[in-house]
Image (cartoon, helix red, strand yellow):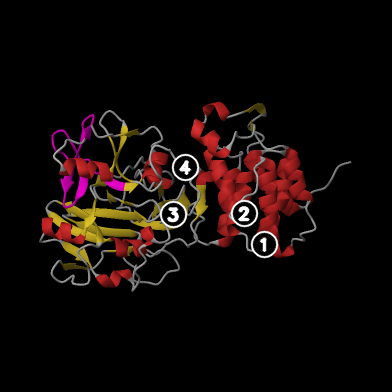
Amino acid sequence: MTRSIPLNRFVTLLALGLCACLTWTQPLRAQTAALPDHVVAAYGAPPTIPSGPLSTEAQEALADILGYSLNQSAWNPVDGDAFDALVAAGDPRSVWLLTDMMRFTWRPEFAAALARTSYSILDVERDGIDHWGRVTNHMIAWDMPAYPGYLADKRTIFTNYVPGWEQIFVEGDINWPLVSWGGVNIDDRPYDTTNDICHCIPAVDNPTVSSAEEATWLADDAVVFGLSINGEARAYPRRIMEIREMVNDTLGGRDLGIPYCTLCGAAQAYYTDMMPVGISRPVLRTSGLLIRSNKVMFDINTYSVFDTFLGHAVTGPLAERGIVLDQAPVITTTWGAWKAAHPHTTVLTEDLALGRDFDLRNTRDANGPIFPVGDVDPRMSVHEDVIGITTSAGTPVAFQRSTALAALQSGQDVGFEDVRLILDAGGLRAVSEDGSDLGSHQAFWFAWSQFHPDTQVWTAQ
């Protein structure tokens, strides 16, 4: 018997099976052999993963559940047929869309159905109350691929709940299944309108600054991120950067975009001038999205998304032009040490903190990542501070900050291949053998190692 499909459901099915006409079903594959031992020990063996399009049964079930997600109030908890059908289809790739729905679910009964279905498909035991985090961590750790057409469905969910993401969710060199919502809206205010109120993490353009003598509000032991460009020095207090998370500034005659990811302990600075002909200065903003607990930033002019940790444009017109932002060195230190080394430094003014003083590192983030990151390389603890850099031969290397700092203070050499660490204003900076700056910064170990899974770790002699 032929079953008719309502038009709106047919459209959803079409999106779910977008690539079905272009691919064919491939043999099942298992990933256990490709996973590190510590991943299997922590998360177990992954399920067998099909390739090619979802089965017709999985497509139909997922289309129904997607419809429920967009109109949860109309769903009857007694109706579990679609969830049961998706479990029967048994394709673990479908769970990515269920995790997306979990992030925006407001109805407890629907959240419970999503969690129950995800655990059943993955054969993972329920544990705790953060089902979204537990399921997502397994999916990331197992390096679970997405099904063909997944991005269109993810875009439908995200843009249904938060306006402004329509131009963000596009194809590019980005692993979209790993992208999750950070709980805030996109900062889509045009350049130099950052005094306008927004329901977002509010970037600041062209911040007001004062001299060191005028900054009586800032204690000497306060953490700052110091930059010195062409002889001009400026301090960006962590207290302010925890609120703003993004600054577009000009220092030493160079334009800069300065993101601070509170979740991964990384303040970075990218040169945003000297672009190729026909490309305007990128103005960086916070999207409200995360990828493995690292902020996703974008250019407000083109809506091109950047890999925040690496500075590569991964979507949009700037990705098409192959834009990669060069990094300037950022020194993580104390205000007392920075102004002693740079007595003529300027510093951002206290009002930019908007009256807030969170100290997120020692409160919210003190016990590890609060968003899913999947597996973490066990060679160091999750929140160990490291200075990460890539050598001229292309080898990523991480220096444990505490060990490297102690070694340098005792007169030892700290280096790996052609990279050397030096003391600078109470912090650490990476230079080449000829003393040229390499644009280093500090970050939590989990962040550096997940973006550089083949990283080497420097050890003291």
The residue under the point 16% across, 37% down is: 412
Residue 375 part of the magenta segment: no
In this orientation, which residue lies closer to the viewer: 358 or 5?
358
Judging by the rendered image, the residue that carries numbered circle 3 is: 367
The residue under the point 64% across, 42% down is: 124
For this view, does 229 lie left or right of residue 281? Answer: left
Q: Which one is closest to the eye, mark 4 or mark 3?
A: 3
Judging by the rendered image, the residue that carries numbered circle 4 is: 174
Q: Position of residue 220 (x, y in %)?
A: 19, 64
Q: Secondary structure at mark 3?
A: loop
Q: In which quadrant is the N terminus drawn?
A: top right
The residue under the point 25% across, 31% down is: 392
Dot 3, how many residues are within 10 Å of its Cα: few (below 14), some (14-19), or many (20+)? few
Q: CA distance from mark 4 to mark 2?
A: 20 Å
Amino acid at the residue labelled 1: Pro
Amino acid at the residue labelled 2: Met
Q: Are marks 2 and 1 in contact (CB under 8 Å)?
A: no
The residue under the point 55% across, 26% down is: 33
Q: Are marks 4 and 3 in contact (CB under 8 Å)?
A: no
Q: Position of residue 166 (x, y in %)?
A: 52, 55
In this orientation, which residue lies closer to the viewer: 109 or 380?
380
Q: Is residue 395 visible?
A: yes
Judging by the rendered image, the residue that carries numbered circle 1 is: 108
Amino acid at the residue labelled 4: Ile
Against 370, residue 54 (above or below) is above
